[in-house]
Amino acid sequence: MKYLDEFRDPVLAKKIVAEINATVTRPWVIMEICGGQTHSIIRNGIDQVLAKEIELVHGPGCPVCVTPLEIIDKAIEIASRPDVIFTSFGDMLRVPGSKKDLFMVKSEGGDVRTVYSPLEAVEIARNNPDKEVVFFAVGFETTAPGNSMAIYTAAKERLTNFSELVSHVLVPPAMEALLSSPDNRVQGYLAAGHVCTVMGLEEYIPIAQKYHVPIVATGFEPIDILEGILLVVKQLEEGRCDVENQYLRSVKLKGNIPAQNIIQKVYKVTNRKWRGIGEIPRSGLSIREEYIDFDAEKKFSVGDINTMESDLCISGEILQGLKKPHECPAFGKECTPTHPLGATMVSAEGACAAYYKYQRLR
Amino acid sequence: MTNINPETLSCPLPIMDHDTIQLSHGAGGRLSADLIDKIFLPRFGNETLDKLEDQATLELPGKKLAFSTDSFVVDPIFFPGGNIGELAINGTVNDVCMCGANPLYISASFILEEGLPMEDLHRIVLSMEEAAKNAGIRIVTGDTKVVNKGNCDKIFINTTGLGIVPDGVNISASNLQIGDKIILSGTIADHGMAVMTSREGLSFQTQVKSDTVALNSLVEEMLNVTKGIQAMRDPTRGGVAATLNEFARSSKIGIQIDGDQIPVKPEVHGACEVLGIDPLYVANEGKLIAVVPDNRAEEILSVMHQHPHGKDAAIIGVVVEDHPEIVTIKTGLGVNRILDMPVGEQLPRIC
């Protein structure tokens, strides 16, 4: 398939692997930010063909994994109401809240629907004027343009029965939080290609300089990831810390300006809790005052739900790259995709799910 | 900047067991298997049922019968490439013939929702007539119930099929031998993606069509080469990955698949990429996976290539001694990774 096959070419992939392995002379720890990249790495066995000096650690870039428990509980509370049609991307449905998940709300009679775009949720609101339609707006900068567009569209049409439960997070503050942590091991980043497509590269330059880490915007196919690793390794070996762009076919220096504009019109930067990491200042998005009528937390008065998270799994350390999934004593035993102990096991993009699915042999 | 102390990190407790039936219990993955193991088998189990084949084979004086039942609840009831009616005939014909049986008779029971347009029912019945004719099977008994609006989704169909297993044929998921070859009869994920992309709410249009078709004539051709086919199954819910895992577990043996050999149509591949779904986990309704002795594999393959339902057939893997009960798949980089059983519903990814 055009735009895919050429980035999965096994012959080219093996050439880049050889080049990486010939370049590396010392141990390096590289973090891929995005869960989509984690899956591509494990699915294609990239970590198994690299020289042992290169350690890939898996970053916090899975929106399902980092959504805090209390937001899931708020979603469950809202979705359980008889007057509500609750809409969400598919993989949020299996994430456990403190008592149940959204699938269980559905089996109890709640109207929970999977949508593929937030604008479909607006369409459902348009077609069901007697129901409150709520969209679960989670994700990184990647989904923010569509999710903000949904509110903008609903406002323009004066739809009063549409709202969003927003738990948007931003990548650069999380990268900085990880780098400034005393336990940090990360020496270079593969930045998330799709986030950079929206936001551009400029916000990474001060981070690269301040913490002396190379940052390479990287795509998701095997060739993309191998090229990204090669660029990071070259920088590390040469002692450079630049922001580079591997994902040239998608990422521009300034990003997608109209997409950034719609995000800024509807959302504002706010402090956010990250599951497994805690609150990071200015690391998320919430709805601006002008659009506050579309805020489901206010509309359904669930703002006071505060759930404490239990400490029985190490997904926090995994999200920070401190530990690997198979180092968790529960991995593959008490904790499997059917019975996830942690969010990293729940989502198809979560690091634990990737390990479980593709590598149980080891 | 925030100081992160890993000791204070946390995540929520799981929901260990479900007190109620979830959709995933019907998705053909691990939760479906759990339901059968924990609820049905302990009460209904007997030596025929315990084999967990797609059909029961029953010894009667002078004859070996194959017997299988299936219910069809697909949404939407009309989808690109077919409808619930022909699916109900083809699905049961395929379950019967996967043990090598020649399907002869089928039942058809309908649960209809009040208000179903007569025109829709008529179209469904016409296509069932056509499908039965194509499969060479007769509809010999049936039943109709009508329920209140909202108590079922337009139309549910149950079919039960009966066939005769030829002498000398003994096909079972537990027969796999080291060195056997795995043959897949054609492109995967066509049916699942046709249904998924035609469901309400998915706004992109695709060319993907269901592959629903009866496979008994293909099976007959294959058995004409040799009666020694070891195992055969049609990879419906849970897809190719689920079927291969069922084989590996039943035979307590390993399977190694070469990912590059698995045929996927470009338009199906595209739809899967957009939704973030792995075609290996998506349902098929007109494909089979056969495990055959190494020395007959090429011959069976060339016969399949002559048949319209097997023209894209390929040898996709081999039965191995290593890693019993585990299926591995070779990636483009030459690394073998695990191809696991699906868990439940296939969930499209966020981004």
Image: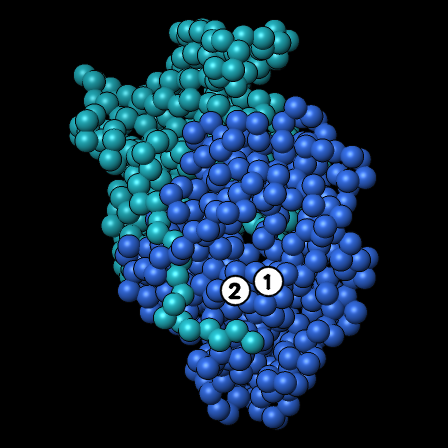
Chain colours: A blue, B cyan
Tell me the tag on residue B191.
none
Q: How many marks do you count on the picture?
A: 2
Report x, y in % for residue A318: 43, 67
Report x, y in % for residue A196: 69, 66
Q: Is residue B55 visible?
A: yes
Question: In the rendered image of this protein, does residue A204 appear above or below residue B195?
Answer: below
Q: Which amino acid type corresponds to the residue marked 2 in the rendered image?
A: Glu
Q: Residue at x 39, y 28 (%)?
A: B95
In which image quadrant can residue B229 be found? top left
Which residue corresponds to mark 2?
A279
Q: Quadrant of the C terminus of chain B?
A: bottom right
Which residue corresponds to mark 1?
A271
Give the letter of the chain under mark 1: A
Q: Nearest the camera: B285 or A185? A: A185
Q: Residue at x 40, y 15 (%)?
A: B106
Q: Residue at x 65, y 57 (%)?
A: A285
Q: Quadrant of the N terminus of chain B?
A: bottom right
Q: Nearest the camera: B73 or A143? A: A143
Q: Nearest the camera: B144 or A353? A: A353
Question: In the rendered image of this protein, does residue A42 appear above or below residue A76?
Answer: below
